[in-house]
Image: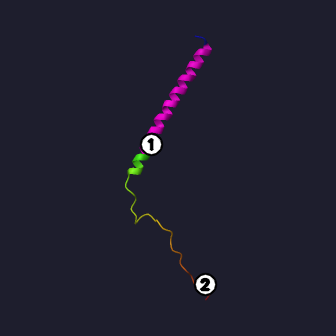
């Protein structure tokens, strides 16, 4: 093999390794998101779901 063929072979091996690592990372993220979605919802008394109520101040007096 010539030097150019070795360089190409190494580059293709690097691309294949990079692709497999990226696919493993995507699978790990999907599993993690599934676990997060399966978690029970937060306590409704601790999470503010509606906007607050604005107090009316009588500033004309």
Quadrant assignment, res 41 = bottom left
Q: Position of residue 31 (x, y in %)?
A: 42, 42
Q: Disc 2 and disc 1: Cα gap in Å? A: 55 Å
Is residue 52 shown above or below 9?
below
Is residue 25 shown above or below 41?
above
Which quadrant is the N terminus positioned in? top right
Circle 1 SS class: helix
Residue at the extreme top of the image, as rendered = 1
Q: Identify the residue shown where x is 58% and y is 84%.
A: 58
Residue bearing the label numbered 1? 30
Dominant secondary-structure state across the stretch colored magenta: helix
Q: State left or right for residue 31 relative to residue 3.
A: left
Circle 2 SS class: loop
Q: State left or right for residue 21 relative to residue 35.
A: right
Crowd class of label 1 (few under 14; some 14 to 19; many from 20; radius 10 Å): few
Label 2 close to label 1 by CB (< 8 Å): no
Colouring mode (rainbow / by chain / secondary structure / one colour): rainbow
Discs 2/1, front: 1
Q: Position of residue 57 (x, y in %)?
A: 56, 82
Crowd class of label 2 (few under 14; some 14 to 19; many from 20; radius 10 Å): few
Q: Position of residue 18 (x, y in %)?
A: 52, 30
Q: In terms of sequence position, does the residue under pointer 2 or pointer 1 come before the other?
A: 1
Residue bearing the label numbered 2? 59
Q: State left or right for residue 3 relative to residue 29.
A: right
Magenta residues span 3-32
Q: Is residue 6 magenta?
A: yes
């Amino acid at each position: 093999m010539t030097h150019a063929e070795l360089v190409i072979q190494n580059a293709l091996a690097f691309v294949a390794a990079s692709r497999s690592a990226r696919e493993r990372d995507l699978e790990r993220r999907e599993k993690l998101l599934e676990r997060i979605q399966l978690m029970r919802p937060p306590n409704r008394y601790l999470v503010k779901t509606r906007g607050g109520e604005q107090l009316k101040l009588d500033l004309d007096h």
